[in-house]
Image (cartoon, rainbow, N blue to C red):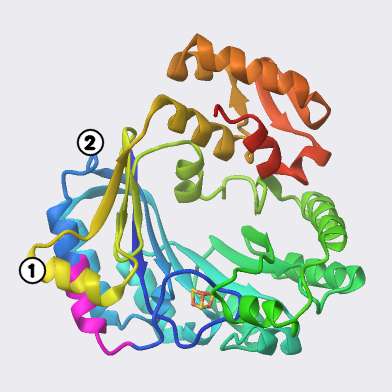
Amino acid sequence: MAGIYIHIPFCKQACTYCDFHFSTSMANGGDMVGSLLTEMDLRTNYLESRELDSIYFGGGTPSILRAKQLEAIFENLHKNFNWRSTCEITLEANPDDITPENLFLWKRMGINRLSIGLQSFNNAELKWMNRAHTAEESFKCVKMAQDAGFDNISIDLIYGSKFQTLSDWHKTLDTAIALNTSHISSYNLTIESKTALGVNYKRGKEPGVNEDLSSKQFLLMIEKFSNAGFLHYEISNFAKPDFLAVHNSNYWLQKPYLGIGPSAHSFNGKSRQWNVKNNSLYIKALNEGGTYFEKEELSTRDAYNEYVLTRLRTIWGCDVKEIEKKFGEKFLSYFKNGCEEKREFLIETNGVYTLNESGKLQADGIASDLFFL
Ligand code: SF4
C-alpha cells in the first residue's frame, strides 16, 4: 500500500506566517494542471504497489481548483493507479471555498476527508494572519460540510501568537471541541524568516513567540482534547478513534509515497526526491522533458535519523526490535545509549520508546540528540 500527495501551488492571498510553496496568481493554472497530469503519467511506476490507501490534495489551496481541473486529475489517477473504496482521499480546503455546490462535487468525485484551515476563531487574529475568512465563516463551513455528509473532517489551529492569552486559548480549545470534528491538527506558530511575519519580526515590528506560554498552551491542549475523546497520536495531531489520518500516519511510519507537483517530496524506501519549488520552472521542465527534481539515496545513517525524528513524535514510538532489524546492531546500541542519557524524557514499554509529557515539549531536540552523527 502507498500514498500519493498532489501539491496545488495556488492561494487566493498569502498568509503572513506561511512558508509553503504557492503563488497568488492563477494565471498558469491550466498549464499547471496539465503538468501535474504529465508528471503522474511519467511516474506511474515510482511506487512498487500501484494500490493506494491514501490520496492527499495539499498546497497551497487545493479547494481553489475548478471542478473540471479536479475531475481531470481524478481521471488521470484512475488511469494510472488502483484504490479501494476505503482509500482515504483528503482535500485541504479553506473556509471561503466551502459551498454546498463544491461539497457536492467533491463528494461525488470520491473525496472522503476534508482538512479545513481554520487557524483561529478570533477575527482580529485572522486579519493579522491575512486569512481570507472570518470566524463566523469557519463555524458555518464546518457545519455545512457535516450536513453534506462528510464525517471525516480535520481542522487546523495555530497557537503561540501574540493574540492569545492562556484563557483565550482555553476558549479556542472549547470552541474547537464543540465543532465536533473527527480530527484536529494544531501547530505552534513558527516565525519563518522569508514570510511577511518573519520580515516584520526582524524589523522589530512583531514580538517573537513566548515559548513559556506556548508550552502551557500545548499542555492545556493535550489535556482538553484527551478529555474530549481525542487520541494524541502525533505531537501536533489529535484524532477520534478510527479517524487517525492514514496519509500522515504513513509518512510517520516510513511507508512509500509519491509526491506530484512543484515542491512535492517522494519517498520509495531507498531514496527521497523533491520537485523544483517554482511553478514556471516545473511547467517548463514537464513540457520540454527536462529535469524537475533532485534526488538523494538514503544512507543507513540518514534512514535511522529519519526514523528517530518521525517516530519519536508519535504514539508508535521507536521500537528496538525494528531498529535492530532495519539498521543493525551498531545503531541499536547507539540508540539505547542515547535513550539512557535521555531517560527522564522517555517512557519504555516492551522495548518501545515514546516521549513523556516533558519529552513532548522538546520532541525535536530529544530526537536530534539521538541522531547518529
Ligand atoms: S497557510 Fe495555506 S492558504 Fe495560507 S498562504 Fe499558506 S498554503 Fe496558502
Type of the residue with mark 1: Glu
Instruction: Measure how far apart labels 2 and 1 are at the Cα level.
Output: 27 Å
Percent across and percent down for residue 314 are 62, 39
Residue 205 included in the magenta stretch of the image: no
Query: Which residue is located at x 56 percent, y 64 percent?
Result: 153
Where on the picture, by quarter, is residue 193? bottom right
Q: What secondary structure is found at the residue carrying circle 2?
A: loop
Quadrant of image for the N terminus: top left
Q: Hey, which residue is sitting farthest left in the picture?
A: 288
Percent across and percent down for residue 265 are 36, 53
Q: Is residue 77 left or right of residue 308?
A: left
In the rendered structure, which disc, 2 or 1, sits on the residue that comes first in sequence? 2
As rendered, which of 261 and 210 lies closer to the eye?
210
| Most common SS among magenta residues | helix
Q: Is residue 101 left or right of residue 227?
A: left
Kindly report which numbered mark, 2 or 1, lies closer to the viewer in this rendering: 1
Query: Circle 2 sits on which residue?
Result: 48
The correct choice, above or below, for 330 with respect to 119 in the image is: above
Crowd rating for badge 1 (residues with CA inside 10 Å; few <14, some 14–19, many 20+): few
Query: Circle 1 sits on which residue?
Result: 288
Q: Which residues are the magenta region?
A: 26-36
Query: Which residue is located at x 68 percent, y 16 percent?
Result: 337
Q: Is residue 173 visible?
A: yes
Percent across and percent down for residue 57 are 38, 64
Type of the residue with mark 2: Glu
